[in-house]
Image (tube, grey):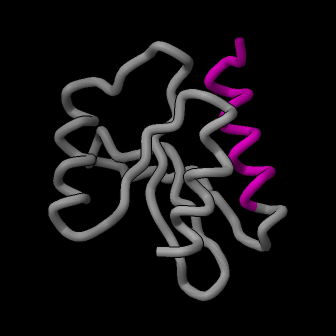
Amino acid sequence: MKSEKQIEQGLVKAVKNMGGIAPKFVSPGFDGMPDRIVLLPYGKFAFVEVKAPGKKPRPLQVSRHGLLQHLGFKVYLLNDMNQIGGILDDIRTA
């Protein structure tokens, strides 16, 4: 089983291989925001919350994800290496 850090590293590498970047998303004074913002070629982007397998977002994180979704942004929960390809395909084709 992969750790949260390993899953996050897998995401960053996969995004880089697609010609994009996935910087850590830090929002001082506004806790609960997703871990990474995925920026792909042609203006495709989304937020990704990375968790260890079996772990769930905290209530504040769920609230922030809902806020972002309400504003029209895509937010993904990534807790398994096998989800990376599908998430990136979804962002790329959105």
- Of all residues shown, which one is farthest toward the bottom? 42
Q: Position of residue 61 (x, y in %)?
A: 28, 36
Q: Position of residue 82 (x, y in %)?
A: 67, 35
Residue pictured at 17% horizontal, 54% vertical = 67
| Residues shaded magenta | 1-15
In the rendered image, residue 23 lying in the magenta stretch gets the answer no
Q: Is residue 38 above or below residue 64?
A: below
Q: Is residue 62 left or right of residue 14?
A: left
The front one of 26 and 72 is 72
Q: Is residue 88 left or right of residue 54?
A: right
Q: Determine the main secondary structure of the stretch shown in magenta.
A: helix
The front one of 38 and 80 is 80
Q: How many marks?
A: 0
Q: Is residue 20 above or below residue 37?
A: below
Residue pictured at 34% horizontal, 46% vertical = 33
Q: Is residue 19 above or below residue 56?
A: below
Q: Position of residue 31 (x, y in %)?
A: 29, 40
Residue pictured at 50% horizontal, 70% vertical = 45
Q: Look at the image and tell me in which quarter the N terminus lies.
A: top right
- Of all residues shown, which one is farthest toward the right? 17
Image-quadrant location for residue 74: bottom left
The front one of 79 and 31 is 79
Q: Is residue 32 left or right of residue 12?
A: left
Image-quadrant location for residue 19: bottom right
In the rendered image, residue 2 lying in the magenta stretch gets the answer yes
